[in-house]
Image (cartoon, rainbow, N blue to C red):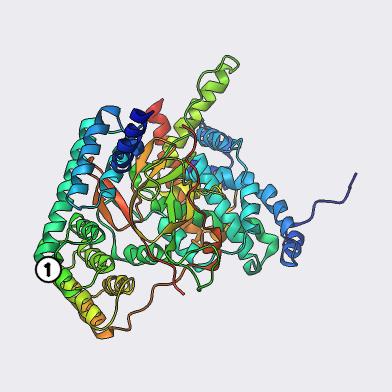
């Protein structure tokens, strides 16, 4: 049976009274109505009011944030192959990752820069970045997802240099940084992401 | 007790555009239940639905000035959330549709009727998820959200005959799925 | 008392060289002495030791068994030796700086062929060469021909660019590929732009204001 009796559609579209129809057609109408009734059950325990109001009250994202947000939106990126367009933006973010604004930012020494770590982990309870900049100690650099949109971020002051790192999700799952386009084998069967922190400039 | 009638959508929009950002909360409270239900049926996932609806509301706030008919705000909000859902679906691979409306775990306080209803909902949701996004959207807008074909045209930008065809095909597929399971 | 003082005097320099303190509690205890020995070997060969310590700490953090940690540290040591030998061949004599050994080890790990690395070393007689190496490696990682990538970066050096600006050169080439050019054309286009390739954008003030330093680790 491919199509059904068109009178079913007419009745459900309000163009025909169901009472005038044979029992088997009335049954189909009731089935559709019952399915709709089930689907119309409210979705309990969910409200978006707080997070929407929090986002509204936050200053509009800078271009950098918008770029980062666009990047972290999944575009079927895989571990090894990346479409060229993502690379350019990732490079922009990676570099953005690091050097001081105008000379004179008081909190950055000459040899220091900043690194921005971003990752999308919608179901995570915690995300940390662990690497050679913190002696591979879990727990010392936590990412935050303040607006609960699943995108976790941290901006960290680090001495200029080259570092290997991974994300640790929920304290136990080691995940490479899918936005990082520099990778090296870790000699333990996985790959580490690599970040180059550029020094502050005057 | 305040006996004034609740402000109309047009009044709230005017207040928000006048600088009263907090008033936007009235619109959220007014429409989030329906939008969440719609998005949950579209995406098959409560969490994904919350993301899509939250994104939709934020966009609505930022582009509120472009809502040309505040008296038809509901339609406008549904259009925004429909697009958010389409965007989520496009990013998600076909094989990756979550179904977190699984039948509830048995609880002594649950009646048999509640459990059976939960299973039936899961069955219907599964049948819905097997539809193409266009047909699913049309069915949910028509039969769950109760929009008229005219309102659906305003939400989706599609012609009414196209929408009718999608709704009809969705009903057929749903009935077939229910028959097969019976 | 005198014996105690002698022990302290003897223990002093040895304690300064040993990394067991850093490794204790971080890697399986049975691996600590072996890793420490490998670090001492590196020190005696005037190789950098920190990459070896980091590799061991990494293995511990990733809960890798002791023998595998030892094997990984041995691999790291041999990578450092290969890097040192390459620098010697390329003319960094009488003894390559530890920082340069680390840099070349990075370049080899990131997939640069040894002859290409040697060319870059020879073209940049004065260290540091880290930015140049990473710039070439960035291009190679995106399937640019290694020799062409090295040519571009060496040309940039000859045009007066140095340090972090060399990373801007590779970024510019990658952008050209993103715009649809072939890799060969991308290199040619950027070469014509030298030395005026776009500068990398600076982080925003709000990003810098948000930046924080790594805190103490969470309690176990």
Q: Residue at x 23, y 40 (%)?
A: A188
Outermost residue toward the front?
C2
Tell me the quarter of the image containing the N terminus of chain B.
top right
Q: Looking at the image, is C183 positioned above or below residue A5?
A: below
Q: Position of residue A123 (x, y in %)?
A: 47, 40
Q: Is residue C144 above or below residue A74?
A: below
Which one is nearer the viewer's eye here, B46 or B131? B46
Give the residue number, with chain letter if any, for mark 1. C91
The subunit letter for the residue under badge 1 reads: C
The percent position of residue B165, horizontal first and vertical second, equals 44, 52
Q: Secondary structure at mark 1?
A: loop
For the residue pair B138 and B94, the one nearer the viewer reads as B94
Q: Residue at x 71, y 60 (%)?
A: B21
In the image, farthest residue toward the bottom: C192
In this view, A26 is above or below A69: above
Residue B40 appears in view: yes
Residue C83 location, quadrant: bottom left
Image location (x, y in percent) of residue C1? 39, 28
Residue A6 showing in the rendered view: no
State the image coordinates of residue A182 (x, y, percent, origin top left). Answer: 29, 57
A171 or C34, nearer to the observer: C34
- Is C27 placed above or below A184 here? above
> Which quarter of the rendering shows the C terminus of chain B?
top left
Quarter holding residue A171 = top left
**Would residue B54 appear left or right of B172 to someone viewing this image?**
right
User: Disc count in the image?
Assistant: 1
Identified at 55% across, 47% down, the residue is: A148
For label 1, the crowd category at 10 Å Cα-Cα, with few meaning under 14, some 14 to 19 and many 20 or more, is some
């Amino acid at each position: 049976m491919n199509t059904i009796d068109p009178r079913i559609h007419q009745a459900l579209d309000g163009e025909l009274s169901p009472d005038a129809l044979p029992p088997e057609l009335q049954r189909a109408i009731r089935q559709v109505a019952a399915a709709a009734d089930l689907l119309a059950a409210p979705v309990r325990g969910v409200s978006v009011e707080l997070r929407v109001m929090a986002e509204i009250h936050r200053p509009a994202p800078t271009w950098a944030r918008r770029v980062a947000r666009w990047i972290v939106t999944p575009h079927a990126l895989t571990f090894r192959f990346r479409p060229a367009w993502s690379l350019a933006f990732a490079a922009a973010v990676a570099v953005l990752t690091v050097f001081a604004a105008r000379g004179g930012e008081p909190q950055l020494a000459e040899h220091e820069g900043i690194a921005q770590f971003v990752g999308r982990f919608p179901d995570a309870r915690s995300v940390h970045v662990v690497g050679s900049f913190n002696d591979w100690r879990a727990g010392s650099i936590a990412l935050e997802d303040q607006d609960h949109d699943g995108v976790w971020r941290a901006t960290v002051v680090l001495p200029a240099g080259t570092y290997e790192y991974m994300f640790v999700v929920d304290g136990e799952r080691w995940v490479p940084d899918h936005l990082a386009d520099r990778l090296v084998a870790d000699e333990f069967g996985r790959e580490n992401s690599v970040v180059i922190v550029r020094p502050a400039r005057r | 007790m305040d006996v004034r009638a609740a402000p109309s959508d047009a009044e709230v929009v005017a207040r928000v555009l006048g600088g009263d950002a907090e008033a936007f909360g009235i619109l959220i409270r007014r429409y989030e239940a329906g939008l969440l239900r719609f998005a949950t049926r579209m995406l098959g996932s409560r969490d994904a639905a919350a993301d899509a609806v939250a994104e939709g509301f934020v966009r609505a706030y930022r582009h509120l000035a472009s809502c040309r008919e505040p008296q038809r705000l509901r339609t406008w909000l549904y259009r925004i959330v429909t697009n958010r859902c389409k965007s989520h679906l496009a990013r998600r691979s076909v094989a990756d549709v979550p179904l977190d409306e699984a039948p509830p775990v048995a609880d002594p306080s649950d009646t048999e009727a509640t459990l059976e209803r939960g299973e039936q909902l899961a069955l219907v949701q599964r049948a819905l998820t097997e539809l193409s996004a266009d047909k699913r959207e049309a069915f949910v807008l028509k039969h769950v959200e109760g929009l008229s074909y005219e309102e659906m045209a305003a939400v989706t930008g599609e012609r009414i005959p196209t929408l009718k065809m999608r709704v009809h095909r969705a009903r057929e597929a749903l009935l077939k799925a229910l028959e097969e399971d019976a | 008392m005198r014996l105690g003082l002698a022990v302290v005097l003897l223990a002093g320099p040895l304690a300064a060289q040993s990394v067991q303190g850093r490794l204790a509690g971080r890697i399986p205890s049975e691996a600590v002495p072996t890793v420490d020995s490998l670090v001492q070997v590196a020190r005696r060969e005037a190789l950098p030791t920190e990459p070896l310590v980091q590799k061991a700490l990494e293995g511990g953090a990733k809960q890798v068994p002791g023998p595998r940690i030892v094997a990984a540290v041995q691999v790291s040591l041999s990578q450092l030796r290969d890097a040192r030998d390459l620098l010697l061949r390329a003319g960094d004599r009488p003894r390559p700086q530890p920082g340069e050994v680390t840099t070349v080890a990075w370049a080899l790990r990131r997939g640069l062929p040894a002859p290409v690395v040697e060319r870059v070393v020879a073209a940049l007689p004065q260290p540091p060469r880290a930015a140049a190496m990473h710039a070439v490696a960035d291009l190679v990682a995106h399937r640019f021909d290694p020799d062409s990538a090295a040519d571009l970066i060496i040309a940039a050096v000859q045009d007066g660019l140095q340090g972090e600006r060399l990373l801007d050169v590779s970024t510019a080439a990658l952008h050209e590929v993103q715009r649809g050019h072939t890799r060969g054309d991308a290199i040619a286009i950027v070469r014509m732009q030298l030395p005026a390739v776009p500068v990398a954008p600076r982080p925003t003030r709000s990003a810098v204001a948000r930046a924080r330093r790594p805190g103490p680790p969470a309690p176990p």
